[in-house]
Image (tube, grey):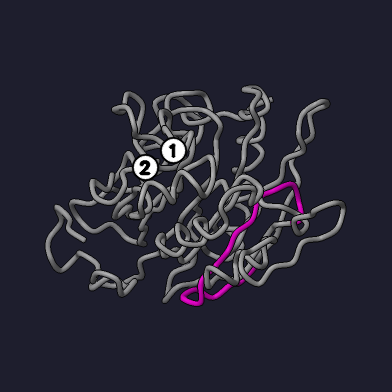
Amino acid sequence: MTSPGSAEDVPEAGDGTARKGGSVLRVATYNVRGLKDDRRALVRVIRALRPDVLCLQEVPRLPARRHGRPVFSRAVPVSLAALARAAGLSVAAGGRLNGTAVLTSPAVRLLRGEGRRLRWFTGLERRAVAVAVVEKGRDRYAVCSVHLDLLAGARLSHAAEIVPILEGAAREFGAAPVLAGDLNEPPGAPVWRFLGARYADCFAAAPDAGGSRTATGAGAAPGDGTFPARDPRVRIDAVFAGPGLTVLSCGGADVPSGDLAAASDHRPVVAEIASGRPPGLGIATSATERAPFPLRSVP
């Protein structure tokens, strides 16, 4: 990995630790569409992401069923637990509450994992978040997987509800907050502005020009973006880093486009994040440093 910063501040490629203090955490987010697509391709994409922490959306709460009976297969994953095993990960949080989950690799130590239901709006899908607090090296991170609603008002209300949940877990464990998921709206929309007043959009902070460039901002060229996977035109999936974190890079999975199109209707996003503030790298700044408008709660 290259960086505009000085050489001694750049992490060693592939070893997951920074040369000068602190560790590097790879956080990915992926909407897997209920494991309804090519599951072998899905496993290949997840393995290519090499995540320490993987935030999932639209995970099935129960194994796949055929003719009313559960389906079991050694060849392809048919449940969240089976997907985790196939990808070399473990289920850390969620999975049973309305479609969000966090998976972790053996490179991190799980301190807590939980699922939390969000306020329900009549007539809309029930929503929940999954939060995992992990430790890598000397650093702790509270990572939250989110999947916001198709209705704009519900999205913004849930975003305002999620932030205290995430930051409460972060405070309890002395961890840095990280939020990742499917926002169901593009950059510049209300939820992005709300979250951007408190956290840093990792892709905007340190876009990775290599790989498949699956995560680009508003106004991106055709073919960029995260949705739909076969012809991605809009970026609705993202990773956000809390204040004080350094965003080293953010992009997509370096895999054949055929696997990306076959695995799900979304494309994944992966970010490399570290604690501290090495010079020349993308910094996740605080709300007071970033906010274009005062942060306020949403009714």
In this rendering, the answer to whether 80 lies above or below 232 is below
State the quadrant of the N terminus: bottom left
Residue at x 50%, y 47% (from the top left corner): 262
- Membership of 265 in magenta stretch: no
Could you tell me the amino acid type at mark 2?
Thr
Please name the residue that numbered disc 2 is placed on: 214
In this rendering, the answer to whether 72 lies above or below 107 is above
Please name the residue that numbered disc 1 is placed on: 226
Location of residue 176 in the rendering, given as x and y in whole percent from the top left corner: 48, 58
Residue at x 77%, y 29% (from the top left corner): 124
Could you tell me the amino acid type at mark 1?
Thr
Residue at x 56%, y 46% (from the top left corner): 31
- Membership of 102 in magenta stretch: yes
In this rendering, the answer to whether 33 lies above or below 235 is below
Query: Which residues are the magenta region?
Result: 96-112
Look at the numbered discs 1 and 2 and tell me whether their residues touch, using CB distance below 8 Å: yes
